[in-house]
Image: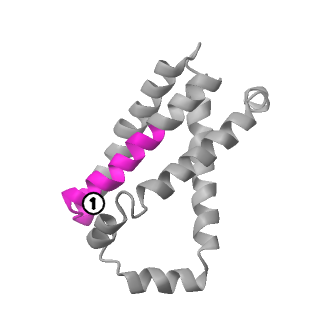
Amino acid sequence: MYNALSQLNYLAIAVTTFAGFLFGWLWYSPVLFSKAWMAEMKITEAMMKAAAQKGMAGFFVRGLVYTFLSTFALTILIESRGPINVVKGAAIGAFVGLLLVGARMLNSGVWEQRSVRLLAITVGHEVILFTLQGTILGAWL
């Protein structure tokens, strides 16, 4: 295992992490789904401003760390599947996003009684995120 970890392309992981983080920023921005997500989460503009005043840096740092961890895991999974190309990377990413992460989020959503709209936003993010990251990694590795 140590040898496999030492041979990972950490530059590819870092760039793919950053791309995934930027995608999340876009997904949850006013350009796409911030208003719908906030409405479904019952978060007001005042609540967002209060959080920002407390310091958004901590949220961004944790988000980046968690994005790195999932990108790291996706990289290991993709590399374990033999010769890689863009299509194979995208397919593995989509599989992980929909059938691993997405399915677990949908299961949690049942018990948390989340709306279909909220689940579509959050699961949609994960599916597209992992597909995007798988595509980048498939092209790079």
The magenta segment is 109-130
Q: What type of secondary structure mainly makes up the magenta span?
A: helix
- SS at badge 1: helix
Residue with the most extreme top position: 83
Q: Is residue 107 visible?
A: no
Please name whichever residue, 106 or 64, is drawn nearer the observer in this view of the structure.
Answer: 64
**Residue matched to label 1:** 118
The amino acid at mark 1 is Leu
Give residue 32's position: percent from left, percent from top: 36, 57
From what the image shows, is residue 40 above or below residue 80?
below
Hey, which quadrant is residue 119 in on the image?
bottom left
Question: Is residue 75 found left or right of 33 in the rendered image?
Answer: right
Mark 1 nearby-residue class (10 Å; few <14, some 14–19, many ≥20): some
Residue at (38%, 41%) from the top-left corner? 127
Residue at (61%, 45%) from the top-left corner? 17
Give residue 44's position: percent from left, percent from top: 35, 81
Question: Is residue 28 found left or right of 78 in the rendered image?
Answer: left
Give residue 132's position: percent from left, percent from top: 48, 36
Please name whichever residue, 97 or 53, is drawn nearer the observer in this view of the structure.
Answer: 53
Q: Is residue 3 visible?
A: yes
